[in-house]
Image (spheres, grey):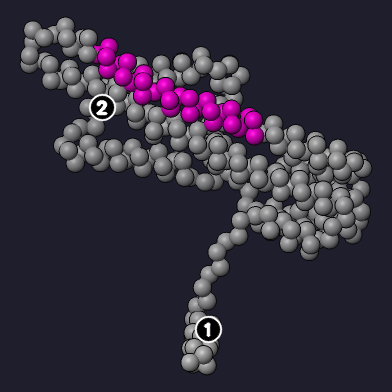
Amino acid sequence: MDIALILGIVGAFGALIAMLTLEGQNVTAILLPAPMIMVLGATIAVSFGSSTVADALRAFRTIPSAVRGKTVKPEQSIEALVGIAEKARRDGLLSLESDAAEASDPFLRVALQNVADGADEEELRTVLEDQIALHERAGKSSAKWFKTAGGYAPTIGIIGTVVSLTHVLSNLSSPDKLGPLIASAFIATLWGLVSANFIWLPIGDRIDRLTDLESQRMQLVLEAVLAIQAGAGPHLLAERLRAMTPQRPQREPRGKQADEKQASDDLDLQDAA
């Protein structure tokens, strides 16, 4: 589980609360039901109206997966795929049918089953690329829904403020009430900005990023399965897949190795002099 989204949202609201506290304000000053209902309710409503019912429902169904942020590390995928390649080399492609039945990943299951069934390489590539494209379209659609909500929220907050200010103008005969009423009026604008930048846009960007990561993993599986089908050796396959994934920076040598390296560098400098 990747808790970056939770940490980000909690941290953002924590900074807001800290600012209010340091300025001597009570947090409950911004927790006014009327502007919150106006901003949050209207934002969801207009976002719902700007898309289709299926798009909106799909977007809300992605929230749990976006919060979890569960991703498979490239090293784990490579290790599993190399193991499959070793089995295919040893027992033949037909043996991959059992791996397909046991695979928890639907994409890998389809790929291995097609290989075991003797599917043509070009046909298999087309089928798998279509599945990757479908996954990307669904993820981008959900991300766009939340980004659209993030675009509507600030403007709706301004609308809420304008509505509240009309109430303020109707009370000009009571100067002692103007200050609190004006302050309350701007709470709608605050919640429009806060909901957009603390909730909607981060969720949309998170879904976008997770979609990209999953598409990269699926592309890795595609190339690996096609290589296995073509008879590639496990070691060559491992090197090829590692070349397709981002490499971690190498750590600097420490301890005795670091001293030996420094001494070697010093000798090289003396020889050069």
- Residue drawn at x 22%, y 27% as measured from the top left: 29
Q: CA distance from mark 2 to mark 1?
A: 60 Å
Q: Which residue is mark 1?
A: 261
Tell me where residue 200 sits by quadrant.
top left
Q: Which residue is mark 2?
A: 30
Q: Main secondary structure of the magenta part?
A: helix
- The answer to which of marks 2 and 1 sits earlier in the sequence is 2
Disc 1 is placed on an element classified as helix
- Residue drawn at x 64%, y 42% as measured from the top left: 214
**Image position, residue 116 (x, y; %):** 89, 44
Foreground residue among 237 and 32: 237
Number of other residues with Cα within 10 Å of mark 2, as a class: few under 14, some 14 to 19, many 20 or more? some
Disc 2 is placed on an element classified as loop
Tell me where residue 248 sits by quadrant.
bottom right
**Image position, residue 220 (x, y; %):** 71, 49
**Labelled pair 2, 1 in contact (Cβ < 8 Å):** no
Residue 256 in view, yes or no = no
Range shown magenta: 136-164
Specify whether residue 233 is painted magenta. Answer: no
Residue 22 in view, yes or no = yes
- Residue drawn at x 75%, y 38% as measured from the top left: 129
**Image position, residue 242 (x, y; %):** 69, 59
- Which amino acid lies under the numbered mark 2 shown in the image of this protein? Ile
Foreground residue among 132 and 12: 132
